[in-house]
Image (tube, helix red, strand yellow):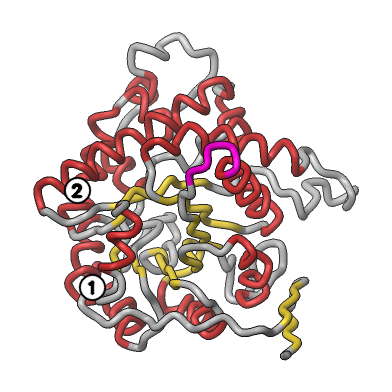
Amino acid sequence: MSNADQLARVGQDRVLILDGAMGTQIQDLKLDENGYRAERFADWPVPIQGNNDILNLTAPDAVRAIHSAYFAAGADIIETNTFSATRIAQADYRMEELAAEIARDGARLAREAADAAAEATGIAKGVAGAIGPTNKTLSISPDVNDPGYRDTNFGKVRDAYLEQARAMQPFVDFFLVETIFDTLNAKAAIKAVLDLRDETGQDVPIMISGTITDRSGRTLSGQTAEAFWYSVRHAKPWAIGLNCALGAADMRQYIAEISRVADTRVLAYPNAGLPNDMGEYDEQPHETASHLSDWAQSGLVNIVGGCCGTTPAHIAEIARQARDAAPRQVRAASASMRLSGLEPFELSA
């Protein structure tokens, strides 16, 4: 069986564990500009410090070690260090032409860590190819004086995602379209993955994770959690859920909303609380884990992990408290017609 199939079987008996934040661990490396550049980019014409994905090329051992630390903490699935590995995002560093190489090496490093962990434990370990939202939005104008203006278009975003997905596919078990603040961006990513499926004949499962940006209960482009699900359910994702922006205390009601309507697995990886005045996260591992354990015991989730501010210590505690809970029972799809704008609409058969 494929790793995805093996994990699906494991997930019938218990909650699966996703990894935690990559950025938090990279910050702990305390790399300066030269640490990001290494020898290869010593003469690069613009600053690249903060381009975490370039470390797939300049500090591969460090990236692989972070993945391995999360597996050691109890993760079943890790995310590749490819959140910004698209031409669109890499344009900030004039590294557009390196996007595919960054994506490929990020996926390869994660695969190496997963295979080593699987060999050591005898248990399947998964790699989710992380596909971030880019720093552009298709639904909202970046110019408050021109609501109709867009500085990119659907085709360009789809093409950027296709290049990224194509580079990662040989090494990943899933594609994870994550931290979605604009559903139209997500649709471009979904279109890219489905087009790649047609191109290669390989059916790599898709996981989708949106972001409720604040306590309004909506994505940045205005959708409720339920409406967001109706907008992407055509992709038949392996899992649907939420990550980032909120801590677990504030995210619970929106995960419950998705859990109520989704006819697939539910995924949740909140931040370690909300950031303090210094932009740092204070929520301790046992605090984050207690929330996710409650969700698991309440039958809301199938997969849990952590986003911003979470560390291997958080994942170890989440695994200890939540992994043995019975997974949420996936509801059967109904024959209702479901539509969505900013709000959901359901017409029962």
**Front position in the image: 185 or 172:** 172
Q: CA distance from mark 2 to mark 1?
A: 18 Å
Q: Which residue is mark 2?
A: 69
Of the 4 image quadrants, the one containing the N terminus is bottom left
Residue 4 falls left or right of residue 259: left
Q: Amino acid at mark 2?
A: Ala
Where is 59 relative to 219, above or below? above
Q: Secondary structure at mark 1?
A: loop
* x then y, percent, for residue 10: 25, 68
Left of 318 or right of it: where is 45? Answer: right
Quarter of the image for residue 172 reads top left
User: Callout 1, which amino acid?
Assistant: Arg
The circle on residue 323 is: 1
Q: Residue at x 17, y 56 (%)?
A: 123
Magenta: predominant secondary structure element? Answer: helix
Q: Residue at x 36, y 24 (%)?
A: 57
Q: Is residue 116 above or below residue 148?
A: above
Where does residue 322 sit, x and y in percent of width and height?
A: 25, 76
Image quadrant in which the C terminus is located: bottom right
Q: Is residue 30 above or below residue 119?
A: above
Residues shaded magenta: 198-202
Q: Position of residue 194 (x, y in %)?
A: 60, 48
**What residue appears at the point 42 percent right and 14 percent down from the top-left corner?**
41
